[in-house]
Image: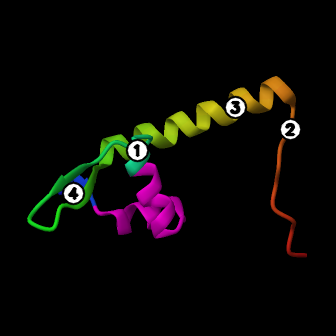
Amino acid sequence: MPSRFLTLADVTEVLNISAPQAYALVRSGELPAIQIGGRLQWRVESTELEKYIQRMYEQTRARISSDGSVVDAPSSD
């Protein structure tokens, strides 16, 4: 059975971002999360992460359609 909740380490892996970036997304409220346990560790519900990813796709599509800009990483040919 897939886990309902993800750690911030899981989030960093899925989004390929750094730990401070994941923490900032959670602290800002952009990525909803809860704190649990005596150490108040963050947990992100897997459905919330998927919603966040979909919002980012929508924002990217809107930005591209409004200004036509696409910024891509340089190729490694």
The percent position of residue 48, horizontal first and vertical second, equals 34, 41
Q: What is the C-alpha distance between the residues marked 2 and 3?
A: 10 Å
* Residue linked to disc 4: 3
Q: What is the C-alpha distance between the residues marked 2 and 4?
A: 37 Å
Q: How many marks?
A: 4
The percent position of residue 24, horizontal first and vertical second, equals 46, 55
* Residue linked to disc 3: 61
Query: Which residue is rendered at x = 10% and y = 62% of the image?
Result: 37
Q: Are marks 2 and 3 in contact (CB under 8 Å)?
A: no
Which SS class for mark 1?
A: loop
Q: Residue pushed farthest bottom?
A: 77
Q: What is the C-alpha distance between the residues marked 2 and 1?
A: 25 Å
Three-letter amino acid code at the position of disc 2: Ser
Three-letter amino acid code at the position of disc 1: Leu
Q: What is the C-alpha distance between the residues marked 3 and 4?
A: 30 Å
Query: Which residue is rendered at x = 45% and y = 59% of the image?
Result: 22
**Label 2 or label 4, whichever comes before in sequence order:** 4
* Residue linked to disc 1: 31
Residue 14 magenta-highlighted: yes
**Label 4 or label 1, whichever comes before in sequence order:** 4
